[in-house]
Image: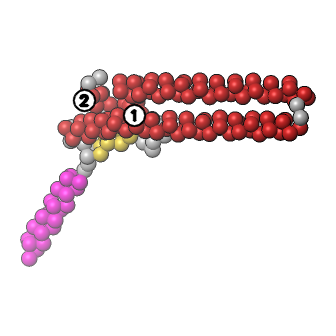
Amino acid sequence: MKQFKKVAIAIVLLVAATSFVNAQSKVAHINVTELLGEMPEMKAAQAELKKLQETYRADIESSMTELKNKYTQYSNEATSKSEEENQKRAQELQGFEKNIGDAQQAAQQELAKKQAELFEPISIKAKAAIEKVAAAQGYDYVIDATQGGGLIVAKGKDLLVEVKQELGF
């Protein structure tokens, strides 16, 4: 009976030790922000966004200059116009200001929409490459090592070089 207890305890310890060893997961890290910043597609997308932003900025600045010119003109002519005409002109200027504000909001929304449209396929491509490299090297978890992302100690394997190779740059 004593012998049976020893064998049973030995088997339980062996199973527990095997389970513990199998439960160990391999963990790696990668700075996703750095990876995305170095991708050629991201640089092209950022250039396209900058060009679109400059176009919107130029249009809005042109409208602001036109508003300023009308304001100056109306201010100079205010003494020679009737009170009714001056009120009408003031309303016109307010409407013009509102249109400029609406155009600024629309431009910001359009830029955000375009950014999401351009960045989504790049993010998907980067994620697929990270998953492929992690699977090939047997990693169960890959943690984003971006500054402020919650990673405190980064002693594990950094996959940045391998993922960049997978993406071809």
Q: Quadrant for residue 90, please give it.
A: top right
Q: Is residue 131 visible?
A: yes
Please name the amino acid that badge 2 sits on. Glu
Q: Position of residue 132 (x, y in %)?
A: 23, 38
Q: Nearer the viewer, residue 7 or 64?
A: 64
- Residue for point 65% across, 37% down: 99
- Residue for point 45% across, 35% down: 115
User: Element type at marker 2?
Assistant: helix
- Residue for point 74% across, 36% down: 92
Q: Nearer the viewer, residue 35 or 119?
A: 119
Query: Vertical placement of 89 versus 141: above or below?
Result: above
Where does the C terminus fall, quadrant-wise? top left
User: Element type at marker 1?
Assistant: helix
Q: Is residue 92 left or right of residue 40?
A: right
> Residue extending furthest bottom?
1
Label 1 Cα neighbours within 10 Å, binned few <14 / some 14-19 / many ≥20:
some
Residue annotated with mark 2 = 166
Q: Is residue 73 left or right of residue 82?
A: left
- Residue for point 89% across, 38% down: 83
